[in-house]
Image (cartoon, helix red, strand yellow):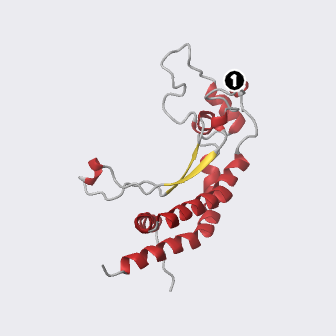
């Protein structure tokens, strides 16, 4: 008999299990966090890096400043785990956990974030000063990188989800098994 679990059930179980393991065995929790990060880098980050352009899409981004493509802070995509509980303002409304992902993938620099998501909001230039506004920035990015905001993070991540879940399953099973052992102990 096959059982179909929704993503929210798995995420909630994983988040609670990671919190239990962190209370009992911090070294195991760190090891699990490293496993999740390693698997995420091998699958999701690798899929995103295949879509990412090799160089700056515009001549104005070919520098090493904060928003430049060659900045040392702009060199990667990070995988993180998050088991944070709900904020106090949401606990009063009955929430134990917010709808935050347990595993997140994000960019580490301004240039990557701009290249990926520019043009999504209602104000396409994002500057109130008309002298600094760059009305051709988004159309040029659309032409060179793709017409849809989230040009590489979302498409690359979605492509890698099945492989990521398949490789992550043994780690999640180990986490849930270990947390269940702790919950079954009589105190």
Quarter of the figure with residue 187:
bottom left
Query: Looking at the image, is 81 positioned above or below residue 117?
Result: below
Task: Classify mark 1: residues with Cα within 10 Å, few (<14), some (14-19) or many (20+).
Answer: few
Q: Nearer the viewer, residue 36 or 98?
A: 36
Q: Is residue 96 left or right of residue 124?
A: left
Q: Residue furthest top?
A: 131
Spot occupied by residue 110 in the image (x, y as percentages of width and height) = 59, 34
Spot occupied by residue 39 in the image (x, y as percentages of width and height) = 63, 61
Q: Is residue 71 left or right of residue 20?
A: right
Q: Residue furthest bottom?
A: 1
Number of labels in the image equals 1
Q: Is residue 179 left or right of residue 55?
A: left
Quarter of the figure with residue 140:
top right
Q: Nearer the viewer, residue 48 or 108?
A: 108
**Which residue is identified by label 1?**
60
Secondary structure of residue under mark 1: helix
């Amino acid at each position: 008999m096959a059982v179909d679990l929704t993503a929210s059930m798995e995420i909630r179980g994983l988040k609670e299990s990671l919190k239990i393991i962190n209370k009992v065995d911090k070294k195991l929790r760190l090891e699990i966090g490293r496993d999740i990060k390693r698997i995420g880098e091998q699958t999701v980050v690798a899929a995103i890096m295949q879509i990412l352009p090799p160089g700056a899409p515009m001549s104005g981004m070919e520098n090493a400043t904060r928003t430049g493509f060659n900045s040392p802070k702009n060199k990667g995509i990070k995988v993180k785990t998050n088991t944070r509980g709900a904020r106090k303002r949401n606990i009063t409304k009955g929430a134990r956990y917010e709808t935050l992902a347990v595993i997140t993938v994000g960019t580490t620099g301004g240039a990557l974030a701009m290249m990926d998501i520019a043009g999504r909001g209602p104000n396409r230039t994002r500057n109130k000063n008309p002298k600094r506004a760059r009305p051709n920035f988004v159309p040029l990015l659309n032409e060179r990188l793709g017409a849809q905001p989230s040009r590489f993070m979302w498409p690359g991540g979605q492509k890698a989800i099945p492989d990521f879940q398949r490789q992550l399953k043994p780690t999640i099973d180990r986490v849930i098994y270990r947390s269940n052992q702790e919950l079954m102990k009589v105190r």
